[in-house]
Image (tube, helix red, strand yellow):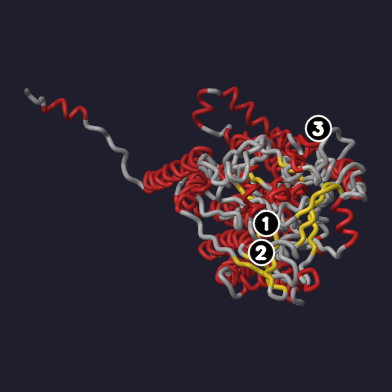
Amino acid sequence: MSNKINRRDFIKLTFAGVAVLAVPKIMRQVQALETLTPNGRQWAMVIDQSKCTGCGYCTLACRAHNDIPPEISWNVVTKTGTVGAQDVYIARPCMQCAHAPCVDVCPVKASTYRPDGIVQMDYDRCIGCRYCEIACPYGARSFNWKQFDGPNSSVPQWGQPEVARRPRGVVEKCSFCYQRIDRGLALGFKPGIDEDATPACVVACPVGARQFGDLNDPESNVSKLLKGRTSYRLREDLGTSPHVYYLPATEEAHS
Amino acid sequence: MKIKLPKIRSLKIRLPQFTLWTGWILGLAIFLTAGATAGVMVLWKGLSLTNLSDKVPWGLWITIDLSSIAVSAGAFSLCAVVYLLGLKRFEPVARTATFIGLIGYTMAVLTLLLDIGRPDRFWHSMIYWNEHSLLWEVTMCVTLYLGVLILEALPIFARFEWLRSHLPKLADNMSQAHRLAPYLAIAGLVLSMLHQSSLGALYGVLKARPLWYRPDISVLFIISAIAAGMALTVFASMVSARLTKHANVDNNLLDRVAHIIGWVLVVYLYFRFWDALAMTYTYEPGRTEGLQLLTGGVLSFNFWIGEILLGAVVPILLLLNKKTRSLPLWRMLAMILVVGGVVAYRWDTNLSGLLIYLSYLPGEPTMAYATYHPSLVEFLAGGGIVSYGLLAFSLGVRYLKVVDHNVVKVHEVEAKVIEAIPVPGD
């Protein structure tokens, strides 16, 4: 520091430097928010509450195919009330939000958006800080407090594990079974139509309450369902834009 | 067999005389051993040994983490006072604060290593950047600032007697780091202003948690940290001076710092008041219930007594009143109350947002409550980390003379650097 720069200038320059570095970064992030909608596929799930009987097959199939420890469930089924004489249930997988709080907060980018809209977890990168768990409005994330080394009670009755068990100390969540989607697409199958390319919970549902498909394809079953029926998403007020839609149970739908 | 008595006499071990110092070190060693055992158990068996859950994933250790960073804020604020505002007379206090800061940040890093599920991947945030994440920003700032603190503390370590006699050259080089002090003060100020507030913003950005989701926590965190950081520095200095001849303090100097703390607390309480009042205006699902946890629920004693009465109101009265402030015992009481109040604030902030959560179910928002009581392992490991901090400070007082207000002489090299930067109005 020469005598020509005094302390005041030095501090000013420091702050100016920080501002110059920070502003383009912030601008880029604002732009990124606006252009988040992908041009390719956008996987979505539609859950019809008027059909759901709360049998829990979806949870069991999920447990088998994704090899989930007994303390954790990626897909929670809850009874929410009754319509007429019928019990109403709600199944909650990961919402695969378009503006996912978990992706925002992860300090190591272990949670990212896939181009097809699925929020992907990198279990080799997660440091287990659990910030995403706290940030998720849907309680869709679970921490592996223990190593899962026992038998999986849902295997083989409900399917065979398709992914590796997560190690102790990382957070895990529903993945829309992208291992099935990716392999199915590679084999020329259509997710949502062909069972081998569709999430295990959708395949397992005995009453067809779950539908899966591409929102960007107007001919997909999910696009058609959403066009024809009234739907809602969970905690829409938060602006997370979930990709799981619910068709409410109504008196008419049951009769 | 014949026993030779004279030989036994010569084998007699000379036990060191039991003094306050050996007793203190022995006590800390016990807690440290227990803490280290608990820590190893957690690393080996995993976080299932804690009472943390998916509902309350952050608990006692996060409180220790946040608190040790908050009480380290004396380092950046006092260094800024000395090197940027040019109030050189506070230099000896800033030295103590820097040493406390170094200890505090290492405590925070230790706690974090224990608290994350994969300590072996602690370095991931250095490699895989998510600039959007406040936790990433905090991690980077804490790491960088730890580097700054190490550089700032080099001249302090250069005072170690053994080093001076055995490696005089190294000791000399280390004290040369003094010439970096003003630049380090700027770096420390920038980094601290970023992460001290971001630790609050970390909670404030979560829209899933209505009680936290407001901009004020970041402001409150940094102001309370400045108060607590300076308070711990004053308290630790005064206690050391009372207990050991290795430390000596300038009472007038500490009196001035204590006066500043009093006013910082007034600012803090003012913002705190508006923050709380704004939240009570209208019913907001989750937020109102969270506030009720603080004002009338499980956290109410902590909130009213720990945070507000003992943590802010009483110290303000003690510190803004010249009579009580100048009496060492009252001043010390005020200082430890400020530190306790800020620790209570960090605990309450974390838990008030976690103990209540909004249901995702459709329809009118419903609330659910969680519970959390730290497990024995959490207490032991936490106690171990705190004992490490106390031990490090005690050793610093004894061997590095970190509390020494007699050496007001600013290092020659450093004095030159300070002169090179004209002080406005000089």
The amino acid sitting under disc 2 is Tyr
**In this figure, which residue is indicated by the disc labeled 1?**
A139
Residue A69: x %, y % from top left: 57, 46
Q: Check disc 3 and report the residue beneath it.
A: A186
Circle 2 packing at 10 Å, graded few (<14), some (14-19), many (20+), is many
Instruction: Provide the secondary structure element on which disc 2 rests.
Output: strand
Counting from the top left corner in percent of width and height, residue B277 is at 73, 74
Image quadrant where one finds the N terminus of chain A: top right
* Label 3: chain letter: A
**Would you name the residue on which mark 2 appears?**
B357
Q: Residue at x 58, y 45 (%)?
A: A157
Q: Inspect the image, locate mark 3, and give the three-letter code of the amino acid beneath it.
A: Ala
* Mark 1–mark 3 distance (CA, rounded to whole Å): 32 Å
**Residue B186 seen in render:** no
Q: Is residue B324 above or below residue B19?
A: below
Same subunit, labels 1 and 3: the answer reads yes
Labels 2, 3: front one: 3
Q: Residues within 10 Å of mark 3 (few under 14, many from 20)?
A: few
- Between B292 and B54, the one nearer to me in the picture: B54
Q: Quadrant of residue B13?
A: top left
| x and y percentages locating residue A115 in the rendered image | 84, 40
Chain ID for label 1?
Answer: A
Residues under labels 2 and 3: Cα distance?
41 Å
